[in-house]
Amino acid sequence: MVKKSKGFRISTRHKLRQIPSMRPPITKFLQEFRVGQDVAIKPEPSSHKGMPYPKFKGSTGKIVARRGNSYIVVINVGKSRKTIVSRPEHLKTI
């Protein structure tokens, strides 16, 4: 038998914890970025939509394009390049 997957956020109880009194301001969800801008991936636990996979937490990359309300970010992982689609609340300018 194959082991059942328990989803995207399994074992993230402490990794994606947020202090209740430290909720983000609405401007964090409405921020805009330019194509070519360098950003860091910092997942926002209060918003599940458009959250990048937890293994990319802390990675830095470049914005390549915009797709709807999200941005396409290219990061280097070892010798390969990964493309991540993420919403603006999970990104931070460098």
Image (tube, grey):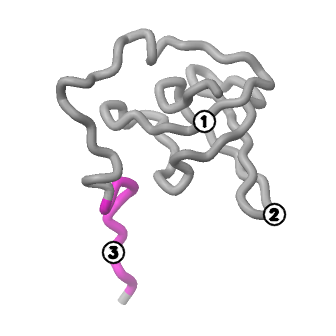
Q: Quadrant of residue 3?
A: bottom left
Do the CB atoms of the residues marked 3 and 2 lie less than 8 Å apart? no
Give me the C-alpha separation between circle 3 and circle 2.
31 Å
Q: Amino acid at mark 3?
A: Lys
Q: Quadrant of residue 58?
A: top right
Question: 10 Å neighbourhood of mark 2: few (<14), some, or many (≥20)?
Answer: few
The residue singled out by tag 1 in the image is: 40
Position of the N terminus, as image quadrant, is bottom left
Horizontal arrangement in the rendering, residue 9 relative to residue 34 (left or right): left
State which region is magenta. 2-11
Q: Amino acid at mark 2?
A: Lys
Instruction: Residue 62: give x, y in percent of width and height.
Output: 74, 34
Viewer-side label of 3, 2:
2
The residue singled out by tag 3 in the image is: 4
Mark 1 or mark 2: whose residue is earlier in sequence: 1
Instruction: Residue 18: give x, y in percent of width and height.
Output: 26, 37
Instruction: Residue 34: give x, y in percent of width and height.
Output: 73, 16
The residue singled out by tag 2 in the image is: 79
Q: Residue at coordinates 34% horizontally, 37% vertically from top-left?
A: 45
Depicted 69 relative to depicted 83: above or below: above
